[in-house]
Structures are given as structure tokens and as C-alpha cells.
Image (tube, rainbow, N blue to C red):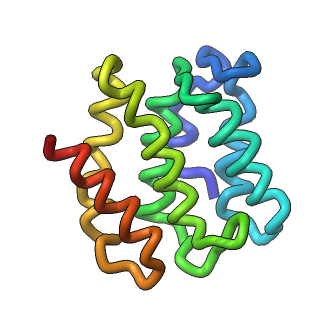
Amino acid sequence: MASEIINSISWKTLEHAYGSAENAPQAFEDLQGDDKDARDDAVNEFLLSSAIHQYTTYSCTPYVVRCVLDIIRNGDIEALESIGAPLVRELFGFINACTPSANNDNTLRNEIINGLDCYQEYLDHHDRKTAKIANVLLKFCIE
């Protein structure tokens, strides 16, 4: 399931809250896999505790945003859930948590803005909370 984008990044040279980000490809596999517990761990332990930790971002964070957007665009995730919510909501939530740091990090900001088409696509999502986060991200992109 790993995409060309995920495989093209030298994760060993990037850091997250707990050291090397070399576990990123496995986390992305888990996000898209059938094992709900592994998917929940990928969201909670990788995205929300490692790639960003208490609103602190790391060298891997812009690349993680890029890969998350690739998964939203190209992954078969519409039926997947995490933590009792649509997976896409959790993925948008991760990106949204990155926005405060993006105000001082142009690389991260540009990666978030590159998701404009994704946010627009989910403005009318059947899950209202997903649509609301998509709208927040859209506003971030155009402000």
C-alpha cells in the first residue's frame, strides 16, 4: 500500500518527537490496513503523538502531511474508521493540528496548502465534523 511518495522520502534522516521517523512507512500502511487497532495506533501514536506532539512539529511533519494528503487522495479509505470516526476526519484533524506551527514554517504551510483540493472535496461530507474540519483547513489555505 505504500505509495511512491511515501517510498521516496528518506525517513531515517527525519525526526519526530521520539527520534528517527523511520517508522513512518509502517504507520502509513497501518492507517490504510484492515486492523482497526493498528489503524487507531497509527493515528494516536504516530500522527498525534510523534509527527506532532503537543502542537510541536518536527522535521518529518511536512512530509507526513504530504503523505497523509496522498492517502486521502489515492487510498481506499472512505469506509475506514479510527477511534469511532471516519478516518478522513482523523487525518484532517492531524493536518489542522499542524496549522499553528505552519504560521512560522513555510515548508509545512505549503504542504498544508497543497491539500486545498482535498479540503474542497470534503466540504459536503456526510459526517458534519469532517466537513467542518475541511472548511477550517480551506480557510487556512485562503487566508
Instruction: Identify which residue is drawn at 69% across, 66% down.
Output: 82
Specify the quadrant of the image occupied by residue 76: bottom right
Specify the quadrant of the image occupied by residue 51: top right
Q: Which residue sits furthest bottom?
A: 126
Instruction: Identify which residue is drawn at 45% across, 35% down.
Output: 98
Could you say where residue 85 lies in the image, as x and y percent from the top left? 63, 71
Instruction: Identify which residue is drawn at 71% across, 19% down.
Output: 20
Instruction: Identify which residue is drawn at 59% across, 31% down.
Output: 52
Above or below, comparing residue 74 to residue 51 in the picture: below
Could you say where residue 19 lies in the image, as x and y percent from the top left? 74, 16
- Residue 28 located left or right of residue 63: right
- Residue 92 located left or right of residue 107: right
Could you say where residue 92 lies in the image, as x and y percent from the top left? 47, 55
Viewer-nearest residue: 83 or 106:
83
- Residue 16 located left or right of residue 91: right
User: How many numbered circles are shown?
Assistant: 0
Task: Give the position of the N terminus as an image quadrant.
Answer: bottom right
- Residue 58 located left or right of residue 73: right
Task: Give the position of the C terminus as an image quadrant.
Answer: top left
Above or below, comparing residue 48 to residue 131 in the picture: above
